[in-house]
Image (cartoon, helix red, strand yellow):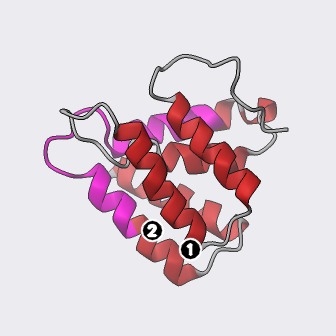
Amino acid sequence: MASEMYCEKQWFELMKGMDIDESISVQAWNEIFRRYTENGRFYHTLDHLEEMLKHSELIHCKISNLHLVKLAVFFHDIVYDPKSKENEENSGKVYSEFSSKINQNLNEMKLVEEYILATKSHKINSNLSTDK
């Protein structure tokens, strides 16, 4: 329950800071919550989101576009099928749909998608675009 409250608060603060319409924010949060609380998730849960969000806050001084990193955090495991090898790609597609709803600029959208895809290997990709 604490993770749910923390993540929800972080989500709505992020959306407010990006000046996203409240109805879109609520709809997206409901989808995020529903997916991260699906049966069969043991690691890719709201607890995991909370840990990642807190980590991003710890290193925020090293991140020039924290809002983009946080978007990637929220969406990076939104699709989870333990039998699939394309969870990150599918999570990126879900993010892309959200990005279209908020009319996010193309460069920011692509950067967030890169961040999401980078979570597949759990390694830092030296070819990953910088957020500066």
Q: What amino acid is labelled 1 in the image?
A: Lys
- Could you say where residue 15 lies in the image, as x and y percent from the top left? 62, 66
Which quadrant holds residue 128? top right
Question: Which of 102/3 is in front?
Answer: 102
Label 2 crowd (10 A; few <14 / some 14-19 / many >=20):
some
Give the residues in magenta. 30-56
- 82 to 2, vertically: above or below: above
Magenta-colored stretch includes residue 40: yes
Q: Is residue 39 above or below residue 13?
A: above
The image quadrant where one finds the C terminus is: top right
Q: Which residue is mark 1?
A: 101
Asked if residue 29 lies left or right of residue 25, the reply is left
User: How would you classify the magenta stretch by its main secondary structure?
Assistant: helix
The CA distance from mark 2 to mark 1 is 10 Å
Q: Residue at x 63, y 60 (%)?
A: 14
Identify the residue position indicated by label 2 in the image.
28
Whether residue 21 appears in magenta in the rendering, the answer is no
